[in-house]
Image (tube, grey):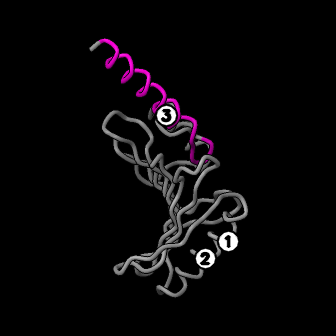
Amino acid sequence: MKKLFLLLFVLFSFLSTYAQERSVAGIPFMSTTEKAVPALISLFGQPSSQTKEEVVFGKVFYDGEKYDEAKFVFDGKGRLVQGRFRNIFQNHAKAVVRMNQIQKKYAIIYKTTQDENPDDGKFYVGYDKDGTRLFTITTFRNRMDFQFGPF
């Protein structure tokens, strides 16, 4: 029983450390709101809305790209678990063009794959250097979402 407990403890510690090494906007996932929110504000200015679960910024620049909105989501323990950059367009076709532009840019740095589902159409998944999913780029109706998380 002690060996099992020790094994689970080591595994949990490894996974927790691994998730913290991955980041969005230079802020490690699983960072506390106390650490993440001031860093986000220094990057993007004052949020347009903020709750315990999320911080939302309007009209941001990230990695040289302009987005209509950036949303950062925190879990029930106040840890950063998701960052999403969104553009809103007049129609779905323009959202798809933007999705393809973002994919092309990040495919130079990360391995990406394309898939499709019947409801939302095609989407891209980007992987970090060890092959773990790092981001998705999707469209839905007239919007494009570029979403990071410790998946």
Residue picked out by circle 1: 104
Q: Residue at x 41, y 36 (%)?
A: 79
In the shown orientation, is residue 107 left or right of residue 88? right
**Quick check: 70 left or right of 111?**
left
Give the Cα distance between marks 3 and 1.
29 Å
Residue, disc 2: 100
Quadrant into which the N terminus falls: top left
Tell me, yes or no, whether the highlighted magenta stretch contains residue 9. Answer: yes
Instruction: Let me know if residue 149 is in the magenta part.
Output: no
| Mark in front: 3 vs 1 | 1
Classify mark 2: residues with Cα within 10 Å, few (<14), some (14-19) or many (20+).
some
Q: Earlier in the sequence, mark 3 or mark 1?
A: 3
Q: Which of the 4 quarters of the picture holds residue 42?
A: top right
Tag 3 and tag 1, C-beta contact below 8 Å: no
Q: Residue at x 52, y 53 (%)?
A: 133
Query: What range of the chain is rendered magenta?
Result: 2-26
Kindly report the secondary structure that dominates the magenta region of the rendered protein. Answer: helix
